[in-house]
Image (tube, helix red, strand yellow):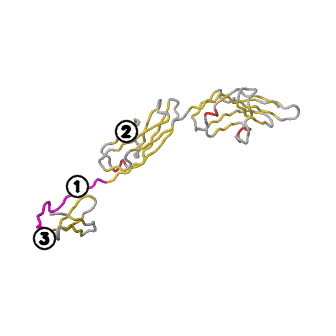
Amino acid sequence: GGIQVLQQPAASSSVCEGSPLELTILANGSFLQYQWYVGTSPNGTPISPSLNPSAETPSLLIDNASSTDAGSYYVKITSSTCGTPTTATSQPSLVTVNPTPLADASTNNSVVCQGSTINLIGNSTPSTGVTYSWLRPDGSTLNGQSPSISNAAFSDEGTYTLTVTNANQCSSSSSVDIQINPTPSALSISPSSVSICSNATSAQLLTATGGSSSFTRQLGVNNTMTSTSGITPYSSSV
């Protein structure tokens, strides 16, 4: 009843910060027990199952790798058969945790009129050694840190997602929403000009159309402007 190691854990592993990591050993034997260690064999520190429930299994799982998880790992296997227990120690596995850049997507005009320009703003921490890519609402991509989209159409409305990637292919994403509003039509007033006598006792009707609605005002009587459509009246000299 010895221990037969079928597959050693990888000699080295590289993972992005915030990503999961798994180290696995395959072995045959009777009543096998596992204990993972961090540090240099044979004087490493046993990983407590209260901190990582997989520490006493064939596969050590680290769900959300951080810089403190970098280092050397190995596992000891014990076969608890009758007589003296048999042990085997795996080869060391060196884990490197690469930093992940933090993406930040924003804009200086989240509400844009149809035909205007959308200004996307991308930032990253750190800001050097990274590439920027934007995913548009229609599924197409834009390259560059802070691209602009001219002559905005209703099809440009939606969520824009920025992905920042470094040389180790570690990446993160951030999103910003853009709303497109219709551009109102030009405002016109009819009649375009009018004459009225001072202290007139009759009113002249002015009609404004365009924009998002139309309204009318009455000019006079006694040099005042009064509203007929719920617009606050104001005084006017003629």
Is the Cβ of the residue at disc 3 closer than 8 Å to that at disc 1? no
What span is in magenta? Answer: 182-203
> Foreground mark, 3 or 2?
3
Amino acid type at image mark 2: Pro
140 magenta-colored? no
Binning the other alpha carbons within 10 Å of mark 1 as few (below 14), some (14 to 19) or many (20 upward) gives: few
Considering only order in the chain, which callout, 2 or 1, is on the residue closer to the N terminus? 2
Amino acid type at image mark 1: Ala
Q: Which mark is residue 172?
A: none
Residue 97: % across, % down: 60, 32
Q: Which residue is mark 3?
A: 200
Q: Which secondary structure, mark 3?
A: loop
Q: Which residue is mark 2?
A: 147
Amino acid type at image mark 3: Ala
Residue 24: % across, % down: 68, 34
193 magenta-colored? yes
Quarter of the image holding residue 35? top right
Residue 77: % across, % down: 77, 32
Q: From mark 1 to mark 2, how far is it between C-alphas?
A: 30 Å
Q: Which residue is mark 1?
A: 186
Q: Which secondary structure, mark 1?
A: strand
Considering only order in the chain, which callout, 1 or 3, is on the residue closer to the N terminus? 1
Q: Quadrant of the N terminus?
A: top right
Name the residue located 21 percent from the left edge and 62 percent from the top edge. 208
Closest to the observer: 144 or 121?
Answer: 121
Kindly report the secondary structure that dominates the magenta region of the rendered protein: loop
Q: Is residue 155 above or below residue 85?
A: below
Considering only order in the chain, which callout, 2 or 3, is on the residue closer to the N terminus? 2
